[in-house]
């Protein structure tokens, strides 16, 4: 009945998540409130790790892309699930360190890592650094030399596949701020150069072709192109690549019309291509890494709001305003992302009218969703916006000096706060 399997209708006709009544959660912790079902996060993490075992003899690792939802609790949970971690900044790395995440299973990405960030990574013996460009490579080699280590690195490659469009195309991708291009020879040249440096060791190549992708083809095509490149590196440089990291970007169901591929299918199809290409190209089978972010956490999360002002502009639009908005979910504002919503206190009421759900920030564009079919909504109702587990809390802000909501984790009818609600004092804490 609902888009995510962690949601149910209970006997009071309230929306339930992870066995907890959302009305009770809103009453206990206040709104706006992020709620996440831990059971579902664990389930999805396991689907991915099991698929590596089943389709690729366990010769690989799933890295959770922490930028989707990054907190100390989440890093501990991912550690317990046995996944590795992808971080893209000093702040995400620091969060992982505070969670005692095994640093050899951390991959550090980013197109403009600073010297301080690279030092933090080296000092803590981060397993892999995914190098983006020549400037970073030289800086990293010098820092590794100073520290007296040889750092294992991968290179971020632009494979020339743009999967952001619905029908993916093989051009255009060269115009990206991330990585080095294959078709111009840039990628080959930088690896040839790195191969001669003394304090970095090239162990792998990486690509990430987009996000919220629903097709298998862009991934299998990326795997094929990357294996071809691995063959070139062996032929021309006698360099054996040990790791092939194919990034994340697996699509999820935000609304009914979305029809994502089952998560293990990605790994099944990619494994097939990699095995075949390894034989064709005469290279050894690389370890496969994949980096799902959104698909592990988004379906597990919802955001609860309290409805305030309801404003009907005759024959134009009905605005339903909630006690949060772009400050806790900027995704409609940034990308016009579709979301589904449920009236949590009347979760079985028929959807009868088109409304626009607005936030409380001082921006006309501060909407959660435009023209969405909802039951009749009244002041004081509790509204649940669904599939907000990824890129909501992690992209939130204090715009208008609005404190961030708390994050509550639920599982089997139990709930606990994993991130406290911000106070006005928290907002002032760095003001002098
Ligand atoms: C964002 C990102 C991911 C995760 O993408 P999702 O769409 O959340 O799965 C993985 N790898 C890299 C390098 C990224 O930048």
Image (spheres, rainbow, N blue to C red):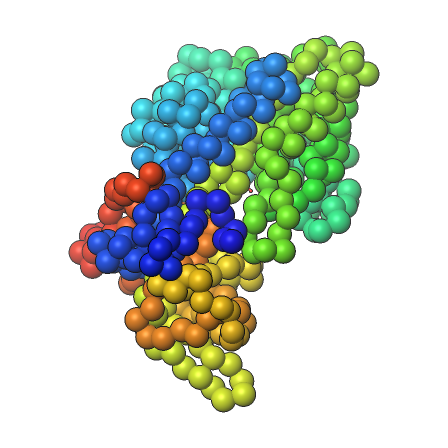
In the displayed structure image, the side of residue 106 where residue 412 appears, left or right:
left
Q: Tell me which corner region of the image, top left, top right, bottom left or bottom right, holds residue 222.
A: top right
Give the farthest residue toward the front.
11
What residue do we see at 45% from left, 29% from top? 85
The answer to whether any part of residue 371 appears in the image is yes
Task: Name which quarter of the figure residue 218 lies in.
Answer: top right
* The residue positioned farthest toward the right in the image shown: 280
Query: Ligand 1, what quadrant?
Result: top right
Task: Choose between 141 and 339: the one closer to the eye.
Answer: 339
- Quadrant in which residue 425 is drawn: bottom left
Q: Where's residue 371, x and y in %?
A: 54, 72
Q: Residue at x 49, y 48 (%)?
A: 4
Give the vertical position of 379 relative to 271 (above or below). below
Point 43% across, 58% down: residue: 385
Counting from the top left corner in percent of width and height, residue 199 is at 51, 15
Q: Quadrant of the C terminus?
A: bottom left
Return the x and y of residue 305 as percentages of the image width and height: 34, 62
């Amino acid at each position: 009945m609902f888009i995510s399997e962690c949601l149910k209708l209970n006997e009071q006709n309230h929306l339930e998540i992870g066995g907890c009544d959302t009305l009770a959660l809103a009453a206990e912790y206040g709104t706006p409130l992020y709620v996440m079902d831990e059971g579902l996060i664990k389930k999805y993490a396991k689907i991915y790790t099991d698929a590596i075992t089943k389709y690729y003899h366990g010769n690989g690792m799933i890295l959770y892309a922490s930028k989707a939802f990054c907190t100390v609790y989440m890093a501990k949970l991912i550690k317990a699930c046995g996944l590795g971690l992808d971080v893209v900044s000093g702040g995400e790395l620091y969060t992982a360190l505070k969670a005692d995440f095994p640093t050899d299973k951390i991959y550090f990405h980013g197109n403009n890592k600073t010297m301080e960030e690279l030092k933090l990574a080296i000092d803590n013996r981060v397993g892999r650094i995914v190098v983006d460009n020549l400037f970073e490579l030289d800086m990293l080699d010098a820092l590794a030399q100073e520290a007296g280590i040889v750092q294992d690195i991968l290179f971020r490659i632009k494979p020339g596949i743009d999967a952001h469009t619905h029908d993916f195309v093989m051009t255009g991708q060269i115009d990206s701020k991330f990585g080095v291009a294959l078709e111009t020879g840039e990628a080959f040249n930088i690896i040839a150069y790195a191969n001669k440096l003394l304090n970095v060791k090239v162990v792998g190549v990486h690509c990430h072709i987009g996000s919220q992708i629903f097709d298998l083809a862009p991934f299998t095509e990326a795997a094929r192109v990357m294996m071809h490149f691995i063959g070139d590196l062996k032929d021309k440089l006698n360099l054996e690549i040990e790791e092939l990291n194919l990034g994340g970007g697996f699509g999820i169901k935000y609304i009914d019309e979305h029809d994502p591929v089952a998560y293990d299918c990605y790994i099944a199809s990619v494994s097939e291509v990699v095995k075949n290409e390894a034989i064709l190209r005469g290279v050894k089978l690389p370890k496969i890494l994949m980096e799902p972010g959104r698909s592990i956490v988004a379906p597990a999360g919802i955001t609860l709001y309290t409805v305030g002002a309801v404003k009907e502009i005759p024959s134009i639009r009905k605005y339903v305003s909630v006690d949060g908005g772009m400050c806790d979910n900027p995704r409609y504002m940034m990308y016009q992302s579709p979301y589904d919503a449920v009236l949590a206190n009347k979760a079985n009421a028929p959807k009868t009218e088109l409304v626009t759900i607005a936030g409380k920030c001082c921006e006309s564009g501060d909407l959660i969703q435009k023209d969405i079919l909802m039951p009749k909504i009244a002041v004081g109702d509790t509204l649940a916006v669904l599939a907000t587990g990824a890129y909501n809390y992690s992209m939130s802000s204090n715009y208008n000096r609005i404190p961030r909501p708390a994050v509550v984790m639920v599982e089997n009818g139990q709930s606990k706060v994993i991130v406290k609600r911000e106070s006005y004092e928290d907002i002032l804490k760095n003001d002098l």
